[in-house]
Every structure is written in C-alpha cells, then in structure tokens.
Image: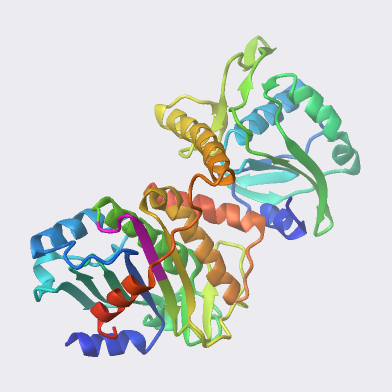
Amino acid sequence: MSHEELLEQIRSRGYWRVEIHSTDYQGKRLPSRAEMQNLLSGATVSLCGWPYPYFQAEETTYNGKWLEGQVNRSYYREYWRLYESGQWLHYLGLSGAWIPREKLFEGLTPLPPQRAGYLHVRNNILYTLTEIFRFAVGLAQGGILDPDAFLSIQLHNTHDYMLFESFNRFFGYSYVNQSDRPIEQQQSLPVGELSAVADQMALEMAIKIYSVFGWVPVEAAVRTLVEDQKKFIERRL
Amino acid sequence: MANAADLEFYIQQRKEERYLEYKCSMMWTDDETTKVKIAKAMMAMSNLRNGGVIVIGMKEIQRGVWEPDGMSAQQVTSFSHDDIAQWVNDYAVPAVQFIVEPFVSDKNQFVIIQVREFDSVPTVCRKQKTLGGGDALKLGAIYYRSNRKNESAPISSEEDMRELIGLAVGKGVAREVRWLHELGLVATEAEPKQGDMLKFEEEREGL
C-alpha cells in the first residue's frame, strides 16, 4: 500500500497528527539516514504494548530528504516522516476507531451504544499523549530541537466517538464528542524545560480532550489519572 | 479543595490507591491504636506529591476490595479537626496540613481526611510512641506510601527515598525558577519564529 493510500485510510477515521520540531529551522540537522535511525532508536518510547512510534529500521525508506515509516497491521495504522531538519511528522490512527464494537467490548452485556468510535480514557488518550511527549523529550535529548521545541498535537475526526473506561471503574457511557473540530494543542518551550514538564503536559492535554467529550474530571479523578500515568511510566501496569 | 463529586469518587473507587487509604468505621477517641493508624497514614500522605486522602467508614469485603459501610453520627463527630491536629502534629514535624469533612453518600456517613503535600521539607516523626510494648510510631521515621504497596510505613527503599528527595528538591528548584521569572531574568515561553515556521511547513509539502 502506498503512503498516500495509507494516509487516506488513517484520515478516514479518528487519528492523531503530531508535529514536533525546533523553532529554529536548520536544513541539515540530520544529514544522513544513519543519524536519523540512531535518533529514532533512542527516542522511541516503549512502555506498555505497542511502541510510539512504530520504528523498525529495516522497514523504513530514505529518499535523501526524509526517512519514512509506516505500518498497517491489525488495528494499527501509522505513517511518519523524519526530515533532515529534524522535523517529526506523524499520522497515527486510533485503534479504537478500527476495532469492532463487539470485539472491543467482548463479554459485556449490554453493549455500549453504537457510536462512530470508542476511545479508552487512559490507553487511547492519556498513555498515547504521555508517549508522544516522552518521545519529544527523546528528540530533544538527541539535540535536534535546540534551542526551543515546537509541538503541535492534534486529534482529528472524533465526532460521535465515545469515551470509555475499564469496566471495573466508576464511569458512564455519556461522554461523546459532539464537535467536528479537531482538538489541538500547540506549544513552544525551551528544550531544557521539556523533560521536566512532559508528563504534566500530557496529562493537561488529556484533560482538555476529555472536556471536549463532556467529561471534566473532578480532582479525585485527576489524582487517579496521575497515579495511572505514573504506573504506566514505571511499567507497573 | 475537593467538591462533592470528588468525595463521592473517593468512596466509589472501592480499591485503595497510593494516594487513597480506606479505614473501617471507628471513633477517633476509641483508643490510641486508632490515632496511631491515622497519624501514620497522614504523615505518609503528606510526603506524597499532591498529598492523599483517607476515607473512614469503608469495609474490606475481600482482600483489596472495599465497599461503603458508613459510620454512626457519634463516630463522625468524634473526628474534629482540632483534636486530630493536636494529636497528629504532636508527632509530625513540620505540621501536617489537612481538611476533615463529614460526607453523606447514599445515606451512609463517612469522614474524609484530605492531606496536603508538604510545603518545603518532608514530614518526619519527631517523637516515639509505644503501644503494647512495641513501637507504634518511630522517632525520626519518614512515613511514606511506596509505589509497590499501598501501605503507610517508614520509608525503607532507596527508590522511595530518591523519589521523596526528588520531590523536595523539585520544590526548591520551582521556588528559584518562580523567583527568576518574577525578576524577569528568564523568558516564560519560547516564541516560534514565523519565517522558520514557514520553512518547516514548506518542507512538509502540504502533509
């Protein structure tokens, strides 16, 4: 499948668009394939399950200007590019957009209402964002975001998607995105600050997304999210 | 400060978390054992990032699974802020900051103690308390809730100690950074340069 076809598939349902680069454009920060691959193998985040991003050096393509990777396996769809300038661009399909409702909620009676897609509060949002921000820290540590990092994280096409929690948790089925607009966060900050605030930024953006779905977590729920995020980071899940 | 939805959430969680400890129904004035248990939990919570919460009036129906049980009116009124502060802070230094609130959920009464994270230095037990011949509270102990076990106990691993030191040092650094921001000596947010942003956009070729 060509990358155009894959991108079309990804964009046909809910997906993330992630753009990370320096605020200072330098065309040749990563002048070779080897440097790009080294950077990615150091920055890839693998805390639990599917890594962020999906990077297998032997499955990548290099055209002299950028390195690109893609995957289209089971419910996972991704396409990414790492440019010579150090710019990172990633389209990541939401797995909850592709798993059939009967499979996603297997064993649950009755099934939740039929919706365009389903997003798990932690797995599909908080943990993904935590990985994205930690990946940005990895890029910063690779020296390609100096002096300041620019991050743009967007969640697209989640109109009529429903938030859900694990079934042993106190949660309802009433949180549905009624908006057609992408949910976006853009931020520029010194790379030295990025590692200190990455997890907090992930949490804040997750809460912003929840609020678009109509869920404004109370302080107690935020505490639980903080703890769950910590468990995820420490690989205690 | 937590609102009613928060307090309800703490009860409905039904399993203890690092920041959340459940206790069975009891009177504050029952005996010294009760006071020691609460004091330990409060000192431990105060040493956690974001503090913690103790819910009194729960029942453990099987290991690790709790359900709301409720307290009598007499039990609830026995938990006064002044009495708890006086007893706990006789052992804790610096003093533990907290709120005590009675709360009704589904006709059951509870007492919820919300403990604040320490301000600048961790809470240490400054006095020995002996009960039944054993040490109930240890002089010099730093009570903590480890990320491996939801239990309020003296800090015993280097991992927990590093985490606590990191929290305390971070608070110090944050104070310094705030001070530098106030003096205008550091920029608060980096400004993206428009010309450079355009070059990144061109590089993406519409993607």
Q: Is residue B163 left or right of residue B66?
A: left
Q: Is residue B156 left or right of residue B54?
A: left
Q: Residue at x 79, y 41 (%)?
A: B100
Q: Nearer the viewer, residue A119 or A20?
A: A20
Tell me if B71 is positioned left or right of B125 in this view: right
Instruction: Please report the bounds of the magenta region as a residue range.
Output: A144-152
Q: Can residue A77 be seen?
A: no
Q: Position of residue A201 (x, y in %)?
A: 48, 58
x and y, in percent, of residue A131 in the image: 36, 60
Vertical relation: A224 (above or below) A88: above
Of all residues, the one furthest to the top in this rendering is: B133
Asked which quadrant contains residue A18, the reply is bottom left
Q: Is residue A150 magenta?
A: yes
Magenta region includes residue B115? no
Is A195 drawn above or below residue A135 in the view shown?
A: above
- Residue A150 visible to an observer of this rendering: yes
In percent of width and height, residue A137 lies at 33, 54
Question: What is the total number of numbered labels drawn onto the structure image?
Answer: 0
Quarter that holds the N terminus of chain A: bottom left
Could you say which is closer to the camera, residue B11 or residue A46?
Answer: A46
- Camera-side residue of B93 and A140: A140
Classify residue B71 by image quadrant: top right
Asked if residue B195 is positioned above or below residue A235 in the image, the reply reads below
Task: Kindly identify the residue that appears in the image at 22 percent across and 89 percent down.
Answer: A4
Residue in the image at 25% along x and 84% along y: B205
Location of residue B93 by image quarter: top right
